[in-house]
Amino acid sequence: MRYEVLKTVAKSELDGVIFTFAMDFDNDQWIDYIESLVELFENNGGTVYFVELETDLAERLVRNKSENRLLHKPSKRNIEQSEAGLRYMARNMRMNTYEGEQLHGNWLKVTNTDIPAEK
């Protein structure tokens, strides 16, 4: 479904779109998906920029319970289930690139463990 929405956006006159997701950098299906998105937008005259956010698990667990997160993400309101999901991903997925690794030329990695959300 996400791909179909993005396909519509790529072919539109919109100035751009921002979307987020968590991915496993060791999973070839995710890598293929990223490459397909780049191709989709670039074939329609767009430019793709990636911003990779990296935060340690302890801070992610704190942020997961923040008032803002709970207000805007109903799926996070079951805190026990949401925390279990975060821990599962931390154990079973490589959620960040290695030093110097990037999947696309327009790639910015931000380690934001010590950066407050307001900034």
Image (tube, rainbow, N blue to C red):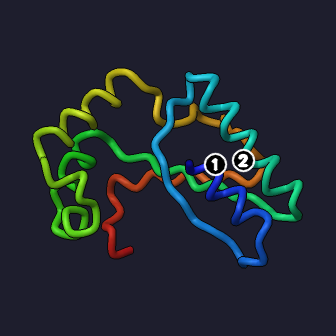
Quarter of the figure that contains the C terminus? bottom left
Q: 32 above or below 108?
A: above
Residue visible at 26% across and 35% down? 85
* Residue 55 picture location, percent across and down: 37, 47
Q: Amino acid at mark 2?
A: Leu
Q: Which numbered disc, 2 or 1, marks the residue that appears first in the sequence?
A: 1
Residue 13, disc = none
Identify the residue at horizontal 33%, vertical 30% (top origin).
Answer: 90
Residue drawn where x is 74% and y is 58% of the image: 48
Check disc 1 and report the residue beneath it. Answer: 3
Label 1 environment density (alpha carbons within 10 Å; few <14, some 14–19, many ≥20) = few
Choose mark 2 or mark 1, whichever is in front: 1
- Residue 13 location in percent, x, y? 78, 77
Q: Is residue 46 above or below residue 40?
A: below
* Disc 2, SS: helix
Cβ atoms under marks 2 and 1 closer than 8 Å: yes
Q: Residue at x 43, y 26 (%)?
A: 93
Q: Amino acid at mark 1?
A: Tyr
Given residues 3 and 110, the one toward you in this image is: 3
Left or right: 34, with 46 as reference point: left
Q: Is residue 12 above or below residue 111?
A: below
Rendered location of residue 87, percent (x, y): 25, 31
Residue annotated with mark 2: 37
